[in-house]
Image (cartoon, helix red, strand yellow):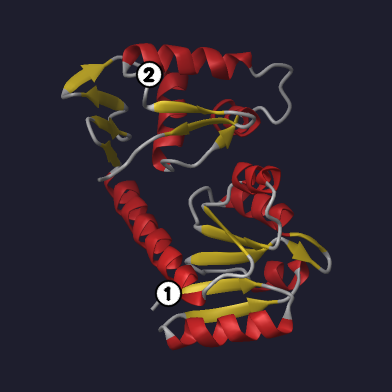
């Protein structure tokens, strides 16, 4: 059983989702506003987050979550269907995105995927070793092996690659990368990010770090 935080202001949808998710064996805490979400947020394993709420936007709450927890799974729910809205949600740090209306069974499937992947991240965090195909990142030894061979990385290159590899297929904006890796909240130029991507690609592969148009970069990885 997983503990979920459901943030949804619609009475009918919220009630039905809570009932359905509880029936599937999950413990569900339901908040109907950002204020309630902030009060109830604690030890949940996953957050299901509506975009439009009576006291603000879900993406604002998502940004707050990401300030303290980079990896907690968050699934955005919204009636917005424009591509730009999906881009904004993903850029803010959403792991997945569902547009209303949707089938509860699909939501259950996506929750299972996110919790499974998050469990793998927890195991990797405790061991200190990230394995992504032919790439192995040993965070304790600060060592990177590519096809079994040790590859020399600078501190920033190592931290940059680790950030992306910890959340494969998630798009990171250049500003978020600067904040997380370099510690800059407001930096006059994002060119340094592009430069480091070029350097990492030269040492590993052009295909590992993918450019996400209009956003930034992501570590592309398919387990299958």
Horizontal placement of 12 versus 111: left or right? Answer: right
Work out which residue is located at the far right of the displayed protein and give it.
Answer: 55
Residue tagged by mark 1? 2
As helix, strand or loop, the secondary structure at mark 2 comes to loop
Which sits in the foreground, 82 or 142?
82
58 vs 98, left or right, is right
Quadrant of the rendered structure where residue 203 is? top left
Mark 1 vs mark 2, foreground winner is 2
Coordinates of residue 204 in the picture (x, y in percent): 31, 18
> Which element carries disc 1, helix, strand or loop?
loop
Count neighbours of disc 1 (C-alpha within 10 A) and say few if under 14, some if 14 to 19, many if 20 or more.
Answer: some
| For residue 132, side relative to residue 34 (left or right) | left
Q: Quadrant of the N terminus?
A: bottom left
Left-right relation of 200 to 12: left
Question: Label 1 to label 2, Cα distance in Å?
Answer: 38 Å
Q: Nearer the viewer, residue 122 or 14?
A: 14
**Mark 1 near mark 2, Cβ–Cβ under 8 Å?**
no
Q: Is residue 111 above or below residue 168?
A: below
Image spot of residue 136 (x, y percent): 25, 32
Percent position (x, y) of residue 223?
Answer: 27, 45
- Pick the residue in front: 105 or 89: 105
Question: Is disc 2 surrounded by few (<14), some (14 to 19) or many (20+) residues within 10 Å?
Answer: few
Residue at 49% of width from left, 69% of height from top?
A: 107
Q: Residue furthest left?
A: 148
Residue beneath the point at 55% across and 16% down? 194
* Residue 58 location (% of width, % of height): 71, 59
> What label does residue 25 carry, if any?
none
Residue in view at x 36 percent, y 11 percent: 202
Residue on which the image places disc 2: 206
| Quadrant of the frame with the C terminus | top left
């Amino acid at each position: 059983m997983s503990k979920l935080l459901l943030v949804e202001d619609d009475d009918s949808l919220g009630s039905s989702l809570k009932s359905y998710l509880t029936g599937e064996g999950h413990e569900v805490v339901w908040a109907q506003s950002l204020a309630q979400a902030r009060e109830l947020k604690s030890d949940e394993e996953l957050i299901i987050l509506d975009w439009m709420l009576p006291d603000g936007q879900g993406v604002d709450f998502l940004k707050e979550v990401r300030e303290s927890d980079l990896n907690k799974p968050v699934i955005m729910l919204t009636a917005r269907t424009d591509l730009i809205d999906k881009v904004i949600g993903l850029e803010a740090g959403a792991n997945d995105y569902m547009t209303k209306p949707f089938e509860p069974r699909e939501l259950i499937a996506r929750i299972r995927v996110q919790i499974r992947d998050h469990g793998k991240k927890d195991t990797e965090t405790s061991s200190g070793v990230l394995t992504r195909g032919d790439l192995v990142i040993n965070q304790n030894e600060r060592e990177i092996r590519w096809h079994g061979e040790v590859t020399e990385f600078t501190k920033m290159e190592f931290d940059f690659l680790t950030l992306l590899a910890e959340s494969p297929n998630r798009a990171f904006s250049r500003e978020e990368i600067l904040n997380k890796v370099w510690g800059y909240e407001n930096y006059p130029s994002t060119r340094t990010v592009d430069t480091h991507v070029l350097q990492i690609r030269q040492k590993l592969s052009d295909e590992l770090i993918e450019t996400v148009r209009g956003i930034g970069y992501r570590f592309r990885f398919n387990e299958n």
